[in-house]
C-alpha cells in the first residue's frame, strides 16, 4: 500500500521537482499571502511542518464557500470543497489501515461500520476544534461568521481540506503523521466507536434481514442561500415513508431520516447499532 501511494503521488503531482524553495514561496504566491495573516501562516507551519512548498493549497483549504459566493470578494475563485473531497479519501484510507491492523478479528462489515463512526461530521468537527481550526477560516463578509465557525459541517470540511492540502504539498507520509497526531492519538477511539451511530447502515441491515427492498432517499426541500443551504430528505421503502431529516448537509439529513425510520421499524434498536 505504501509503495502504491508513493508511486501515485510521484506520478500525479510531481511536487519535489517543481516546488519553489521555501524562501521564495511568498514571492511566488502573492495572492496566498494576501489572503492569509502571519498568524495563520505560523499556525499552518506548526501543523504541517516548517517547510511549505505551496502555501496557496492551505489558502484554499481554509476558504469557506461563502467567500466564493460573496459579491464583495475579488480574485478568490475556489473554496475548499475540492480539497475536502481529496482529504476525505486520504483520511478514510489511513483510518481504514489503522482499523485493519488494530482489529484483526473484525469482519469487513464491522471495520466499515467502525470507520463510519470515527470519520463523520461530528467527530471531524471535534478534531477541528481541538486544533482551533475555526479561528483561521476565511469567511465571506456577508455571511454569518459566528454560525460558520461553530458549524460542524464547516469545521469538518475544513479539517478534511487541510488533510488534502498537506497530502498534495508534502505527501502521504506527512498526511499520515498529521492524522496520527490529531485523530488517532488525539482522540479516544474507543469512546467514538461506542458513541457514534451510523443509522443508514443500520437501516440497510434491517431491510436486508427482513427481505425488504433497499431504502430510497429523496430530497424533498432545499432552503437558504447557496453557501448556507438546508436540506430536508425523506427515506422510504416499498413506497412507504419511514422518516425525514433536515440538516445543512445531505449526508447528515439522510442519517437523521434513517434514525427516524429505525424508530418506526424497530423501536429501541436505533440506539444500539452493531
Image (cartoon, rainbow, N blue to C red):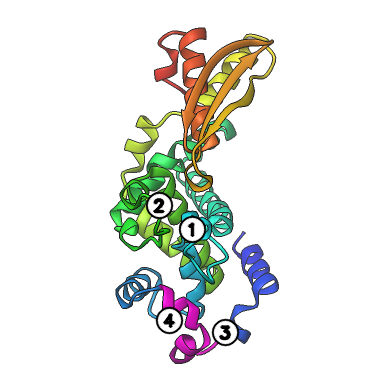
The percent coordinates of residue 125 (x first, y second) are 37, 47
- Residue drawn at x 52%, y 20% is 244
Q: CA distance from mark 4 to mark 2?
A: 33 Å
Quick one: label 1 or label 3, which is nearer the N terminus? 3
Tags 1 and 2 touching, CB below 8 Å:
yes
Tags 3 and 2 touching, CB below 8 Å:
no
Question: Can you identify the residue that label 3 sits on?
Answer: 19
Question: Can you identify the residue that label 4 sits on?
Answer: 51
Q: Which label was assigned to residue 70?
A: 1
- Residue drawn at x 51%, y 82% is 29
Q: CA distance from mark 1 to mark 4?
A: 32 Å
Residue 106 in view here: no
The percent coordinates of residue 6 (x first, y second) are 62, 69
Q: CA distance from mark 3 to mark 2?
A: 35 Å
The percent coordinates of residue 260 (x first, y second) are 47, 16
Q: Which residues are magenta?
A: 20-35
Local secondary structure at mark 2? loop
Q: Is residue 201 above or below residue 30?
A: above
Q: CA distance from mark 1 to mark 2?
A: 8 Å
Q: Is residue 31 magenta?
A: yes
Local secondary structure at mark 3? loop
Q: Nearer the viewer, mark 1 or mark 4?
A: 1
Observer-nearest residue: 254 or 168?
254
Local secondary structure at mark 1? loop
- Residue drawn at x 62%, y 64% is 5
Crowd rating for badge 2 (residues with CA inside 10 Å; few <14, some 14–19, many 20+): some
Question: Can you identify the residue that label 2 sits on?
Answer: 143
Amino acid at each position: 500500500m505504501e509503495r502504491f501511494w508513493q508511486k501515485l503521488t510521484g506520478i500525479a503531482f510531481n511536487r519535489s521537482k517543481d516546488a519553489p524553495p521555501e524562501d521564495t514561496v511568498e514571492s511566488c504566491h502573492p495572492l496566498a499571502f494576501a489572503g492569509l495573516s502571519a498568524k495563520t501562516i505560523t499556525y499552518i507551519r506548526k501543523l504541517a511542518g516548517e517547510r511549505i512548498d505551496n502555501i496557496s493549497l492551505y489558502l484554499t483549504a481554509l476558504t469557506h464557500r461563502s467567500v466564493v459566493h460573496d459579491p464583495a470578494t475579488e480574485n478568490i475563485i475556489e473554496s475548499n470543497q475540492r480539497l475536502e473531497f481529496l482529504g476525505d479519501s486520504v483520511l478514510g484510507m489511513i483510518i481504514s489501515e489503522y482499523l485493519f491492523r488494530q482489529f484483526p478479528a473484525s469482519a469487513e462489515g464491522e471495520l466499515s461500520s467502525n470507520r463510519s463512526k470515527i470519520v463523520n461530521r461530528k467527530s471531524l468537527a471535534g478534531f477541528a476544534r481541538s486544533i482551533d481550526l475555526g479561528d483561521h477560516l476565511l469567511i465571506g463578509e456577508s455571511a454569518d461568521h459566528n454560525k460558520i465557525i461553530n458549524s460542524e459541517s464547516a469545521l469538518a470540511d475544513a479539517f478534511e481540506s487541510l488533510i488534502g492540502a498537506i497530502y498534495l504539498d508534502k505527501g502521504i507520509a506527512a498526511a499520515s503523521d498529521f492524522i496520527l497526531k490529531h485523530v488517532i492519538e488525539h482522540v479516544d477511539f474507543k469512546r467514538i466507536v461506542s458513541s457514534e451511530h451510523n443509522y443508514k447502515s443500520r437501516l440497510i441491515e434491517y431491510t436486508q434481514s427482513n427481505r425488504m427492498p433497499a431504502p430510497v432517499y429523496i430530497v424533498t426541500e432545499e432552503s437558504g442561500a447557496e453557501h448556507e443551504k438546508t436540506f430536508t430528505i425523506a427515506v422510504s421503502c416499498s413506497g412507504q415513508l419511514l422518516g425525514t431529516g433536515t440538516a445543512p448537509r445531505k449526508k447528515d439529513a439522510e442519517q437523521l431520516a434513517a434514525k427516524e425510520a429505525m424508530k418506526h421499524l424497530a423501536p429501541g434498536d436505533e440506539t444500539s447499532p452493531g
